[in-house]
Amino acid sequence: MRIDDVLDEVRALRAADAPTHGGRTLAYVYDSGLAEVDELGARAHALASAANALDPTTFPSLLRMENDLVATAAALLGGGRETVGTVTSGGTESCLLAVLAARQARPEVADPAVVLPTTAHAAFHKAAHLFGLRVVAVEVDPVTFRADAETMAEAIDEDTVLVVASAPSYAHGVVDPVAEIAEAAARRGVRMHVDACIGGWVLPYLRRLGVEGPAFDLSVPGVTSISVDLHKYAYCPKGVSVLLHANTELRRGHYFGSADWPGYTMLNTTVQSTRSGGPLAAAWAVVRHLGDEGYLRLARDTLHAVEAIRAGVEATDGLRVLGEPGATLLAVATDGTDAGFDLFTVADEMRQRGWYVQPQFAHGHSPVNLHLTVTAVNRDCHDEFVADLRASVDAARGSGPVAVDPALRALLAGLDPDALTPEQFAGLLDAAGLAPGADAALPSRMAPINALLDAAPPRLRERVLLEFLGVLYRPSRREATVD
Ligand SMILES: Cc1ncc(COP(=O)(O)O)c(C=O)c1O
């Protein structure tokens, strides 16, 4: 096929995606609103995408760029002379490696555990699953959604290899009391990781702009590692994060080497072995171009947009902002259970108006809410967002809340997800409206499906949605691209 035709096909496929630019997708994507930043990232990516960080001696450019990025991150996040780091593929990999390094450092612990607030990112559950740790999830304050340092301290015992706090949490945008938690961890001789994957590149600038909040970085005594994603608020192309450790000894456990085969001695700093130089070079270029001043400006724009959206939500009848957000993320809930509308319908209404807001299911004290990741580009559209949010609430009020049949709700609550057969899962997918369609397209109204999923206990929801994922990832002959 001709190159232009192939690229046209890519463009046509991409047309069905949520927009990645313009501020109308308030999750998954981060937009500086500066076209030249995207252009620079793409060009630098292309220059290095074939280079392989698997061997830094063969590709010294990547070694240099990685050391530069780590140095910049360390300077931003309170690192000292001993601070070292690793560039990874993203937040989840950084969190995985923080957990792995901590576990490897304590081989004498037979039943290692990671102590985290219930609001910590699911990446830590994945790490525990992959590396054989126990998760000790500690309740957070039911109103502020901030981790409780005292309860966290009580949960630390001789099996604890790592304690985690967020700066901020994804779900509510709340910065945990890092200093108090780190102090408790240090007292027990346990490592402490700060997950600043989403906030690490914007919180330091917010502090400079006068936003107060807990200290959260490597300068806090007891913090042994911190992660920050460059593909979030550093506005770099996807596939790049930095994990910093306070010293080389702390980092050692996530390195892997094997000489026990006939090929090259495999030496890896991350989960990946072959690592494209593309995301690294793109990030290096974008960070150099924007510089400290550029990020300060973008943080100012973002702060302005967050404040405007927050004020707009709080002035909207029936809506409130959950917890005490301290960064650039908001969780929007209804005022009460009898608000007369539901947020899943509001999300559908927003979608019809060209916005993507991310529904978050109820969990513990956290009610159903809509997650908003606000980025710099929202400086230009926050008023329009608030106006459409209000119109969406009005429309949702007009149609009334979606209801889940009480009998179905009771049925869901009683199901044992671990005992269900593939046929029963297929039946559940059908009942949830997620049965495979001809083109795997989702219905335009997701509210009934989301309400049903919300009624399912988390474990059942996980299993049903994983079945759904399995249905999505099934190639058909029609989709074959090489024939
Ligand atoms: C606090 C936090 N940690 C970890 C992650 C995981 O990052 P990624 O999606 O890049 O793997 C995220 C993603 O939003 C996050 O917000």
Image: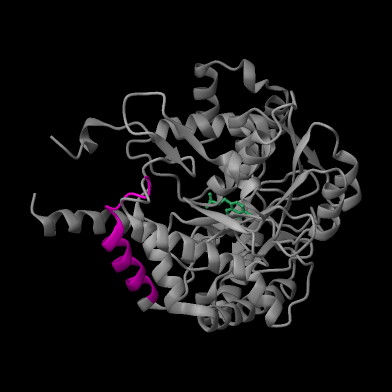
Residue for point 38% across, 64% down: 282
Nearer to me, 29 or 123: 123
Does residue 192 show up magenta in the picture?
no
Q: Is residue 52 above or below residue 71?
A: above
364 horizontally vs 79: left or right: right
Residue at 54% across, 19% down: 424
Where residue 243 appears, as percent x and y from the top left, is: 58, 54
Left or right: where does residue 164 sit relative to residue 277?
A: right
Q: Position of residue 386 (x, y in %)?
A: 61, 74
Q: Quadrant of residue 373?
A: bottom right
Residue 447 visible in image: yes
Instruction: Using the image, determine if residue 118 lies above or below residue 305.
Output: above
Query: Residue most toward the left?
Result: 2
Residue 209: x and y in percent read: 68, 83
Question: Which image quarter holds the C terminus?
Answer: top left
User: Looking at the image, is 178 positioned above or below residue 40?
Assistant: above
> Taking the image as drawn, is residue 355 in sight?
no
- In the figure, residue 280 lies in which quadrant? bottom left
Question: In terms of depth relative to the viewer, which is nearer, 149 or 218?
Answer: 218
Q: Is residue 449 left or right of residue 406?
A: left
Q: Main secondary structure of the magenta part?
A: helix
Count of labels in the image: 0
**213 lies left or right of 247:** right
Quadrant in the rendering for residue 44? bottom left
- Of residue 274 and residue 251, the one placed in the foreground of this image is 251
The residue under the point 86% across, 43% down is 188
* Residue 53 is one of the magenta-drawn residues: yes
Coloring scheme used: one colour
Q: Which residues are magenta?
A: 37-54
